[in-house]
Image: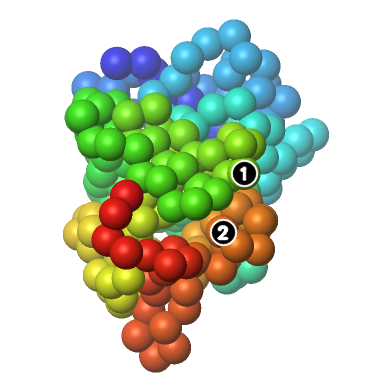
Amino acid sequence: MEPILVVDDEEKIRSLVRLYLEREGYSVEEAENGRTALDKFQRGTYALLIVDLMMPEIDGWRVCREIREISTVPIIMLTARGEEFDRVLGLELGADDYLVKPFSTRELVARVKALLRRSMLSLDSKTLEHELNYGLIKIDKEKHRVIVDQQIVALTPREFDLLHFLAKNPGRVFSREQLMETVWGYDFFGDARTVDTHIKKLREKLSHPQVKSMLATVWGVGYKFEPEHYSGNR
């Protein structure tokens, strides 16, 4: 497996995270700031990134944003402030998970394992599933690709999984808790507002009015995928 890149301007944090990850058998590399992290990422291949938000030169938000333009590698963001704005912004920029400092190293290791497990399942699950076709939107599970009005839409792995799950169950309403359990997994430590953040981001990225309206909110219940004139045929 490719190494995990730990990005933090505090040497003690990097050393502690490295120690516990290496105890679990992972290979670890370090970067002391965002600029070094981006340089390393351009030259190497990584299984997962752990990125601090507040860093000199280039902060974690920019690191996440630039990496998401070229890669779907799992990203865990670290924040010392723990404010909801920081968490939501990190998720909107494409982070898959977050931890608030000070954090439990056992919890960090658990989250790393969960993200890597889902990442591997995603790579290994190239089944013969047919492409989902709903008018202007096409969702290809095998290629992990979404096309809207003949244009490819770049989604994070979690955004794709959420969209694909809803689209393969058209018309069915799912609560936030059901989506958390199914798409994120029982071992996810976040809260249900994470679903709202990802739905909002999906609507922004799908952009076309006819397509984004397919992600319908059922007030007081949750969300559903409701294609126009759906007749049960894909």
In percent of width and height, residue 138 lies at: 46, 42
| Frontmost residue, 46 versus 132 | 132
The extreme right residue here reads 57
Where 166 falls versus 159 (above or below)?
Answer: below
In percent of width and height, residue 12 lies at: 50, 36
| Frontmost residue, 73 versus 155 | 155
Name the quadrant containing residue 233.
bottom left
- Label 1 secondary element: loop
- Label 2 secondary element: helix
Q: Would residue 53 be seen by someone viewing this image from the given angle?
A: no
Q: Which residue is mark 2?
A: 211
Where 1 falls versus 12 (above or below)?
Answer: above
Q: Residue at x 28, y 22 (%)?
A: 26
The 10 Å Cα crowd at callout 1, few under 14, some 14 to 19, many 20 or more, is few
Q: Residue at x 61, y 37 (%)?
A: 150
Where 115 falls versus 142 (above or below)?
Answer: below
Asked if residue 50 lies left or right of residue 167, the reply is: right
Q: Residue at x 64, y 68 (%)?
A: 85
Instruction: Indicate the amino acid at tag 2.
Output: Val
Q: Would residue 100 be seen by someone viewing this image from the given angle?
A: yes
Name the quadrant containing residue 147.
top right
Q: Which quarter of the rendering shows the N terminus? A: top left
| Frontmost residue, 119 versus 170 | 170
Instruction: Indicate the amino acid at tag 1.
Output: Asp
- First reached walking from the N terminus: tag 1 or tag 2: 1
Q: Which residue is mark 1?
A: 149
How far is disc 1 from disc 2 in space, using C-alphas?
9 Å
In percent of width and height, residue 90 lies at: 59, 53
Q: Are marks 1 and 2 in contact (CB under 8 Å)?
A: yes
In percent of width and height, residue 151 lies at: 63, 37
The 10 Å Cα crowd at callout 2, few under 14, some 14 to 19, many 20 or more, is many
Name the quadrant containing residue 209.
bottom right
